[in-house]
Amino acid sequence: MRIAIMGIQGSGKGVQGDRLASDLCVPRIVIGDVIRERARVDDEVGREIADQMGRGELVAEPVVVQALAVRLALRPEDGFVLDGFPRSGTQVGTLDAMLGRLGAQLDVAIHLEIDEQTARSRMADRLVCSVCNAPTSRRRVGTGDPCPLDSCVGTVVPRTDDQDSVAVDTRLAEFYALTVPVIDEYRQTGRLIEIEATRDEDAVYDEMRSRLAALAGSRP
Ligand SMILES: [Zn+2]
């Protein structure tokens, strides 16, 4: 299955997307990782991306689209869980065209829905491993506790971008301005699954799997 997963900060998009990709045996393609990988290629485009990132600028849309097209074309027969794209209404059509050229299509978009207050409180609670970036929460462990992965020697710390109230406001505003139109677009074209995601992780995941199974079963 080819799936795009969306949700506001703190919706559990990363954790749920990881789990889904691993259970479906498909890659989780995170647009930020795709761009960072492209920046490591030593050519003109790679150096330009590295420069833009170094200056803290947004990488230009054509460059992002091109990097994603190359990544998707690597194994076009595979499914994926795509995270971080489309990030504007117009990019919905861009992704469809990109997949169309590979003889493929997006099966479904999943929106993990939480309210803004829950998003804010989850961001405030969020902790990550200082070594491997594994995510966890103050609801499970405390700052300075060992990494949740047994194989890792790191300790967990708050994410710096979650502690800065201006940065938090900016990211929430970006979600409403950019991603909500994407969600609307998928809803209008009948390709959206919406999951109420304020519940615990397992309940959200189970509903997501059963809705995807129902969708796969309804196809000829
Ligand atoms: Zn770790």
Image: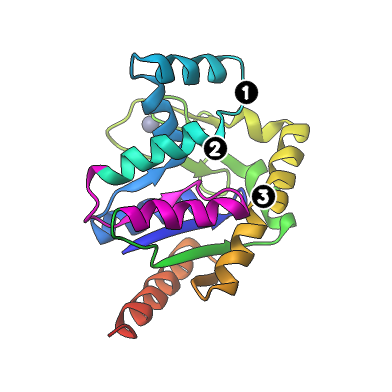
First-in-chain label (1 vs 3)? 1
Q: Which residue is mark 3?
A: 178
Q: Residue at x 49, y 51 (%)?
A: 94
- Contact (CB < 8 A) between labels 3 and 2? no
Which quadrant of the rendered structure holds the C terminus?
Answer: bottom left
Q: Which mark is residue 57?
A: 1
The answer to whether residue 111 of the structure is visible from this angle is yes
Asked if residue 94 lies left or right of residue 123, the reply is: left
Q: Which mark is residue 127?
A: 2
Asked if residue 215 lies left or right of residue 191, the reply is: left
Q: Residue at x 55, y 36 (%)?
A: 61
The magenta-colored residue range is 74-101
| Gap in angstroms between the C-alphas marked 3 and 2 | 26 Å
**As displayed, is residue 142 above or below residue 190?**
above
Query: Which residue is at the front of the view, 145 or 7?
Result: 7
Q: Ligand 1 appears in which quadrant?
A: top left
Asked if residue 176 lies left or right of residue 192, the reply is: right
